[in-house]
Amino acid sequence: MTKNIVVVAGGGGFIGGHLVKRLLELGTCHVRAVDIKPLKDWYQVSTAAENFAGPADGDARDFRVCRTICHGASDVYQLAADMGGMGFIENNKALCMLSVLTNTHMLLASQEAGVKRFFFSSSACVYNADKQLNPHVTALAEADAYPALPEDGYGWEKLFSERMCRHFREDFGIQTRIARFHNVYGPEGTWRGGREKAPAAVCRKVIAAKASGDHSIEIWGDGTQTRSFMYIDDCVEGIGKIMDSKIYEPVNLGSSELVTINQLVDIAEEIAGIKLKRHYKLDAPRGVAGRNSDNTKIRSYLGWEPSISLKQGIAATYRWIEEEFRKECDPADAKSLATSGFSHGSKPIPGDGYVAESRHMDTWRQGIPVGYGAGG
Ligand code: GKE
């Protein structure tokens, strides 16, 4: 019996890598994993999948690539995006918005190929910033995305692409499903280099402090800012449930366990068995003051919501990063891994992020496919 073809765009990344593995474990479909990164840089490689890797075969910003990977497919999971934690999205707003090329071309190619279901990975960054001014935040319900005032760059692109998914469903009939991810973390994710999010960054810094013997930690902001963090296994389970559901409009996929960044550091310290001196970097990217996920809608539709506790998830994540650190880092590097850097495209940049001469740098080229518009 021929199996349905299922495409995972962004399959070489954090969430995509776990999703490819889960789909293969289910054994009901043929999986195509697609990512712009060369195969050697994929976070996880599943040899049982049909892997499309690198700028030529795996760049889903390129319509030609999208047509090839969507041909004959029944389901598409569109998770490909230029993204990262606050250190990246605050310093690369134009690159984050250029992910619109990927979402547009993947929707067009899916429509053309007769794809039945299209899953789009949106984000809590679509939410109105004026509703996230207080650490004691009221959990965000789906309607709080309007009136629109999302996170600059990344949030606007996600909100726009949500609308495009909706209108492709309404006008062209493709079954779209949209989940707003609330800060996903776990093993096999980004933990250094400038794109990492807070859970991985904090684990790395505690591990580095322990390894270097310098028992201090640099924390962005004043540590009172709040978030909810969702463990990867809940995320992958939620993606499957939402794709199989009748939830047409965007829905939160996130934990409702609200913590301060100081409490996140407490948890990592407890796992490490050390207490660190805290230095607060007030000029570092902080994002909103408070953010949490209101799970009323997902519970009402699915009778389910993410439930893996932060303590449990951070314990697994800490162990995995500790192992990576041991494998990849010389203890002498520990000091350099005790601080988080910012990046412009993939170029590290100094200090507060702004570089006057960036006008002349070719960072913008990183936002478009090789040969884009060639022959024009
Ligand atoms: N990345 C990072 N690295 N954040 C730190 C660090 C550090 O070393 N130290 C403290 N923080 C603080 C940040 O200043 C921010 O206030 C909080 O942790 C969470 O930062 P984050 O994990 O980078 O990202 P945010 O939750 O603010 O925003 C992310 O939300 C996701 C959706 O929930 C976005 O960057 C996207 O990754 C995504 O939209």
Image: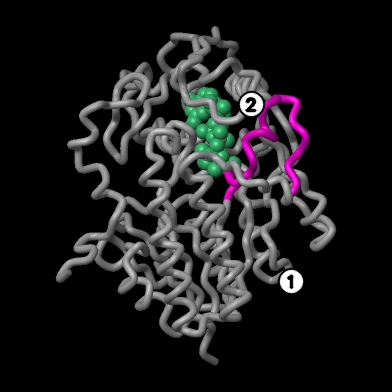
Of callouts 2 and 1, the N-terminal one: 1
Locate residue 345 relative to residue 243 in the image: left or right: left
Who's the residue at 22% across and 66% down the image?
Answer: 373
Please name the residue that numbered disc 2 is placed on: 289
**Residue on which disc 1 sits:** 246
Residue 185 visible, this angle: no
Magenta stretch: includes residue 124? yes
Residue 263, can we see it? yes
367 or 308: nearer the viewer: 367
**Quarter residue 290 falls in:** top right
**In this view, the mark in front (2 or 1):** 2
Q: Position of residue 371 (x, y in %)?
A: 19, 63
Taking depth in this image into account, of 284 and 69 the one nearest to the observer is: 284
Q: Position of residue 359 (x, y in %)?
A: 22, 35
Q: Which stretch did the figure color magenta?
A: 123-141
Relative to 85, residue 167 above or below: below
Is the residue marked 1 within 8 Å of ligand 1, measured from its CB?
A: no
